Image: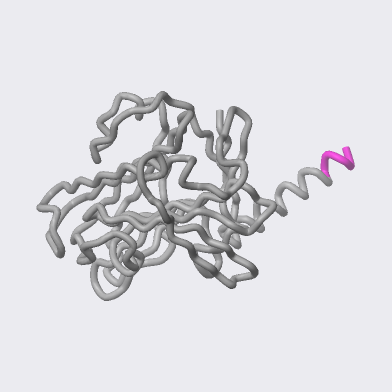
Amino acid sequence: MILKTISLFALLTTMISQSLTGQSNESLQVKRTADFSIDGRGGASQWSAAQWIAIPRRNTKTDNTPLKTRMKILYSDTGLYFLFESEDQQLSATMDADFMKLWKEDVVEVFLWPDTNNPVYFEYEISPLNYELPLLISNEEGDLARWRPYMYEEDRKTRHKTTVKGGPKQSNATITQWTAEFFIPYKLLRPLHNISPSPGTEWRANFYRVDYDGEQSTTFSWQPVEKTFHDYENFGTLLFE
């Protein structure tokens, strides 16, 4: 009885602590799929096997307008598939090339940390206009070093498409939603370790969105972070089925 009381107290203490800090380090089951083509809409039948995951808003816009964000993930023998749906009012994106500072405008982002023995992870950003920024990040106690891929072609290159609802896919257009669908091959993640997952493999990860409607940006994240998106200690866990 005493042991049960202690265990219950420990559980309640953990739950209260997580509630106060907003940190729960959730786990997400990732289902396997055969490789498929993407269309920027999530039209492939394979997506029916994946569950929608909410990406909650973590700060409040000046007008407090609710905007929902959700995503799906699948993995195959060759890489990872992602599908983001982001409700929006204005397409706040003007950058017209890959490898630009996309995080300064509307964007969704994926952070993948396959080998937790080293503070090195992969960051991927994509804008509503279908421009991308893939980066390898070394994070030594907040000292960030960023590397862009070289010889970025053939089986190392991502596949990505975006679509827009409620308006045209052009800068500053009034819209209702934008969707990003993309594929990240494992070969792009080299020289990270543990990059070819099999059933039972675990990675750490986080998923983000930044929306720039109005004067104040709004941030969304799957797992809450304390200061920046690079707070990898608070990433969630991907469990590959």
Q: Position of residue 20 (x, y in %)?
A: 60, 61
Q: State the residue lying farthest toward the left.
A: 168
> Is 167 on the left or on the right of 77, as rendered?
left
> Is 3 on the left or on the right of 75, as rendered?
right
Q: Nearer the viewer, residue 79 or 110?
A: 79
Q: In the rendered view of the protein, which quadrant contains the N terminus?
A: top right
Q: Nearer the viewer, residue 6 or 134?
A: 134
Q: Position of residue 184 (x, y in %)?
A: 41, 43
Q: Position of residue 158 (x, y in %)?
A: 36, 44
Identify the image quadrant of residue 5. Answer: top right
Q: Nearer the viewer, residue 69 or 140?
A: 140
**Residue at x 35%, y 29% (from the top left corner):** 47
Residue 30, relative to residue 85: is it above or below?
above
Q: Nearer the viewer, residue 62 or 32?
A: 32
Q: Which residues are magenta?
A: 1-5
Does residue 151 appear in the picture of this structure? Answer: yes
Residue 205, relative to residue 39: is it above or below?
below
Q: Position of residue 67 (x, y in %)?
A: 30, 55
**Residue at x 57%, y 63% (from the top left corner):** 138
> Is 99 on the left or on the right of 196, as rendered?
left
Q: State the residue lying farthest toward the bottom.
A: 215
**Residue at x 62%, y 35% (from the top left corner):** 201
Identify the image quadrant of residue 208. Answer: bottom left
Query: Magenta includes 195?
Result: no
Query: Magenta includes 3?
Result: yes
Q: State the residue lying farthest toward the front.
A: 151
* Predominant SS along the magenta part: helix
**Residue at x 10%, y 53% (from the top left corner):** 168
Does residue 56 appear in the picture of this structure? Answer: no
Q: In the rendered view of the protein, which quadrant contains the C terminus?
A: top right
Identify the image quadrant of residue 108. Answer: bottom left
